[in-house]
Amino acid sequence: MVILPPDLDPELVARLGESGGGELPRRMGIEFLELSATHSVARMPVEGNRQVVGLLHGGAHVVLGESLGSISSAIHAGPGRYAVGIEINATHSRSITEGWVTGTCTALVLGRTLCTHEIVMTDDDGRRLSTVRMTNMLRDRAAD
């Protein structure tokens, strides 16, 4: 069960429920545990997300980070607005070959037009695997 803020935009709740966070996160086995604008947590299995030599693929770290940063920014954007990723980077500190990766997303800046989040990936023992930083631009939805 995902922990969500009580005042979350109902349209966003419906989209999250229908999509499971999106096609790629669902395919990679990402499980969202807690979602808010300021603090979000998700986990992902290493199995099924390894590169050719058996290590968790670096791009998998980025997918987990971007998933958390994008949803957290969308929550901050609120009704009638949406978030668009404009910059992402990752620093990989340690490799992993089995188990689960947990991403913890923390807001660095929650502005009117930009959001920046830092997402720290850790292994089952709490060791840092990678750090992702993502910036999203917030836009108004076009009128129908």
Image: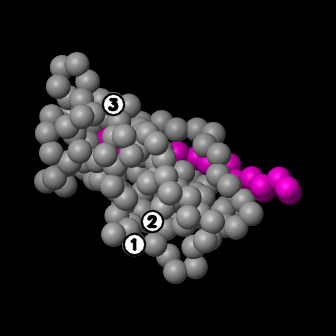
Q: What is the quadrant of the N terminus in the image?
A: bottom left
Alpha carbon distance from label 3 to label 1: 27 Å
The disc at residue 3 is 1
Q: What is the quadrant of residue 85 in the picture?
A: top right
Q: Are marks 1 and 2 in contact (CB under 8 Å)?
A: yes
Q: As drawn, is 42 to the left or to the right of 133?
A: left
Mark 3 highlights which residue? Answer: 58
Q: Position of residue 127 (x, y in %)?
A: 19, 49
Q: Is residue 63 visible?
A: yes
Task: From the image, give the main secondary structure of the stretch colored magenta.
Answer: strand
Of circles 2 and 3, the one toward us is: 2
Residue shown at 27% from the left, 33% from the top = 49
x 86%, y 57%: residue:
143
Q: Amino acid at mark 3?
A: Gly
Q: Specify few, some or many for label 2: CA neighbours under 10 Å numbering under 14, 14-19, or 20 or more.
A: many
Q: Residues within 10 Å of mark 3 (few under 14, many from 20)?
A: some
Which of these two is toward me, 38 or 97? 97
Q: Are marks 2 and 3 in contact (CB under 8 Å)?
A: no
Foreground: disc 3 or disc 1 = 1
